[in-house]
Image (tube, rainbow, N blue to C red):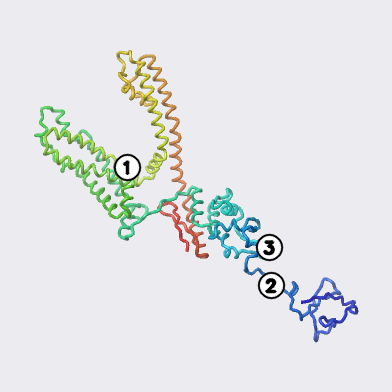
Amino acid sequence: MEVALVNFDNSDEIQEESDYATDLDTTSPKGRPGGSPFSSWRILVSDRTTHETAFSKTPGDYVDTPGPEPAALNEGSQRVIINIAGLRFETQLRTLDQFPETLLGDREKRMQFFDSMRNEYFFDRNRPSFDGILYYYQSGGKIRRPANVPIDIFADEIAFYELGSEAMDQFREDEGFIKDPETLLPTNDFHRQFWLLFEYPESSGAARGVAMVSVLVVVISITIFCLETLPEFREDRELKAMRDPGLNASKTPLSHSMFTDPFFVVESTCMVWFTFELLLRFAVCPSKTDFFRNIMNIIDIISVIPYFASLITELVQETEPSAQQNMSLAILRVIRLGRVFRIFKLSRHSKGLQILGQTLKASMRELGLLIFFLFIGVILFSSAVYFAEVDEPESHFSSIPDGFWWAVVTMTTVGYGDMCPTTPGGKIVGTLCAIAGVLTIALPVPVIVSNFNYFYHRETENEDKQNIPGEIDKILNSLGSRTGSVDSLSKTNGGCSAERSRK
């Protein structure tokens, strides 16, 4: 198309050409007059040419339409401009191409946001968050939330740019979310129901009821274990023989049978529940190997064994001579001591005991250091007090091993007073031992307390953070319904656990 600029006040100067018309007659015009800022000028646009200019386009022709990315941007060394709500960022294509499954790394996905007029990609998203998103590409996969961006907003940006589940897991870990271990459930529906019923009290109301019954039985069992040691309730054949040496224990029948003892009946009832619970959980567990690796299951087994061992011992000792019966009684007392481990069954239903166990596990190095310091101090000061008191006739320290007990109670600031130095040199050693004990214990104890505070606050703060993963679920689910390829997060047993749902 050709354009001619004509001044009609001087129309005589215009040569007659077949392509342009100066005649103002509108009956058969050869050209179309158009308005101009100049009153006496007209723009004639020829209809006979096929060339296009800006004057021949309509406003609709300037609307951006999706098209191929410019050839200049196809090379990895070229720079890319990314406009985030008016704030421009520049990077290279090869930086984005490191992660082709993400929104910015996939050419087809990012072309939906390409502005051909400005030669840039435009995203109407949160501007401060993009610092962390771009750093993910530049650092090769490290996600860092900017300090001035809320957690839920940055999680929304991670999901929008489709950085993947690994980036989301890394983000949640950096923010202090507790990553729950993968829950292994039985494949059989019947087994799964019983496994959830006895293993996960929070899974249903019936499971909470079973947990309450289990706690009640444990409390009753521990109470019986303590009450049966009272003198008015104790029927110990060996104790009777000690009180009356002339009495033949082998010929003296028990005042009442063990099977009619109320304590034994209550104990047996509790053991029926413990045994039933243990066997049922073992029968429906998803992995028999992992079952025996669980410390709580080991405690359950240890708490059950003493009952059956004591029952067998009681039945066997009635047919043995008195000397062997005394040996059986000694073994029986040791076996019964294992019943005290039942109190640890409460840790299955107590967050506080679980935090204490985690603290001790995390503080094994500090506890070992404390024991090592005490060992050195005990050897050093027990030897010193022995040589300081060796010439004292009434000294309590007849040997270095006899001074071990005194050194331990002195360094731990207990000070029973059953053993004490009497000479001036011994008192000086005792003073130094007490001072060294205070310093020795003071060094590692704050670290142990710090570990306890960490686990305690992490547990309490995790309850406050549980609402955030719920919002993340909504974000990812909404994006998943739109894009069809999004990773989702889910909460399991009061915590946050990630699962891949890439389609």
* Nearer-N-terminus badge (2/1): 2
- Image coords of residue 101 (percent x, y): 53, 60
98 to the left or right of 422: right
For label 1, count other residues whose C-alpha is less than 10 Å away and answer few (under 14), some (14-19) or many (20+). Answer: some
Q: Which residue is mark 3?
A: 118
Q: Amino acid at mark 3?
A: Arg
Specify the quadrant of the image occupied by residue 401.
top left
**Residues at circles 1 and 3 in contact by the CB criterion of under 8 Å:** no
Q: Is residue 469 above or below residue 232?
A: below
> Is the N terminus in the top left, top right, bottom left or bottom right quadrant?
bottom right
- Image coords of residue 86 (percent x, y): 66, 58
In this rendering, the count of numbered labels is 3
Q: Residue furthest left?
A: 251
Q: Amino acid at mark 2?
A: Asp
- Image coords of residue 213 (percent x, y): 29, 49
**Residues at circles 2 and 3 in contact by the CB criterion of under 8 Å:** no
Residue for point 53% across, 59% down: 162
For label 2, count other residues whose C-alpha is less than 10 Å away and answer few (under 14), some (14-19) or many (20+). Answer: few
Tell me, for residue 344, which label it has, or none.
1
Tell me, for residue 61, which label it has, or none.
2
Specify the quadrant of the image occupied by residue 240.
top left
